[in-house]
Image (spheres, helix red, strand yellow):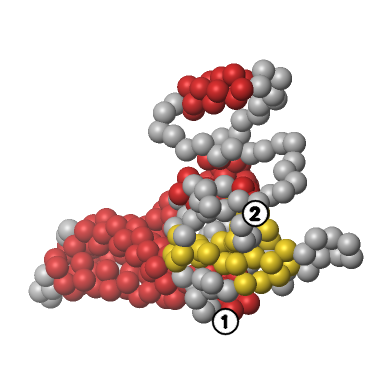
Amino acid sequence: MVPWFNRVSAGYFQTMGTPLLAGRDFDDHDTTSSTEVAIVNQEFSKKFLGGKNPIGKQFRMLVGPGEPQHSYQIVGLIRNSKYRRLRDNFIPTVFVADSQNKEPGLGTHFIVRSGLPTGSVMQAVKKTILDQNAGTSVQFQVFKTQVQESLLKERLMATLSGFFGFLAAILATVGLYGVISYMVARRRNEIGIRIALGASRSNVMRLVLREATMLIVTGLVIGSALAIVVARTASSLLYGLKPGDPLTVGLADALLAAVAIFASLLPALRAARLEPMVALREE
């Protein structure tokens, strides 16, 4: 695997909020006349150094015929971060000092981190740059907006999934309520006889809720198994979704169980309030 290279200046990692795990950041001593230095991420250390501390190690970059040879000394180790897209796996990444670039390009990128309103920051930065060179072309991109736009499809799918999940919960509530109500209606005579023979209202409620619980448990077992299978397909549509995640499955089961119990309470209460004589007259 070929590592990715990127040129950055001192303070880049602090601005981006990337933790420096070992070593140092680039500084004023890193010049074109000093030893070329680099900062690598954890994935680089894992792939090429077996996870050992990379500080002080040296490596060379393969170049073509006639191209200058570069040998870098590793002076820092940073935590893994995504390079292009959030869906990408961590890749070995090397950051070299922009201050040691002997052939700088015409354009450059600046990253500004501020708690001030975006508009005022843009105006201040643009004014500062144009004061140095009035002919400079300046373009701005908000990093947070770029991240949000990269997740537009995922956000849309999450919204649709949430809507259909809410709709499914409503249908499950109505469906279970109808099933339990039908069950109670069919057993009105039996329930009337039980009450006439001395069964308490609480015993009748437990009877109804026990059967509802059996339906709920059976549905949750089958539904959880199907959800884990289907989630393997859905994981390609939603960023960060882990098929079979215990916390997600557990919370979903708890929510559905609560909805099902709520839907069963009304038929259970109706059965407990049933008058024996009225029930026995119906045949």
- The percent coordinates of residue 222 (x first, y second) are 49, 75
Q: Secondary structure at mark 2?
A: loop
Q: Quadrant of residue 36?
A: bottom right
Compared to residue 265, the image places residue 48 above or below, namely below
Give the camera-side residue of 111 and 150.
111
Compared to residue 142, the image places residue 137 above or below, namely above
244 relative position to 203: left or right: right
Q: Residue at x 59, y 79 (%)?
A: 49
- Determine which of the numbered discs, if any, sits on residue 50 in the image: 1
Q: Which residue is mark 2?
A: 33
Q: Quadrant of residue 207?
A: bottom left
Give the camera-side residue of 7 and 231.
7
The 10 Å Cα crowd at callout 1, few under 14, some 14 to 19, many 20 or more, is few
Q: Residue furthest front?
A: 33
- The percent coordinates of residue 58 (x first, y second) are 62, 72
Give the camera-side residue of 31 and 204.
31
Q: Residue at x 61, y 30 (%)?
A: 140
- Determine which of the numbered discs, if any, sits on residue 192 in the image: none
Q: Residue at x 74, y 41 (%)?
A: 105
The 10 Å Cα crowd at callout 2, few under 14, some 14 to 19, many 20 or more, is few
Q: Residue furthest bottom?
A: 50
Label 2 sits on what residue type?
Ser
Q: Earlier in the sequence, mark 1 or mark 2?
A: 2
Label 1 sits on what residue type?
Gly
Q: Residue at x 51, y 36 (%)?
A: 112
Give the camera-side residue of 57 and 47.
57
Compared to residue 110, the image places residue 81 above or below, namely below
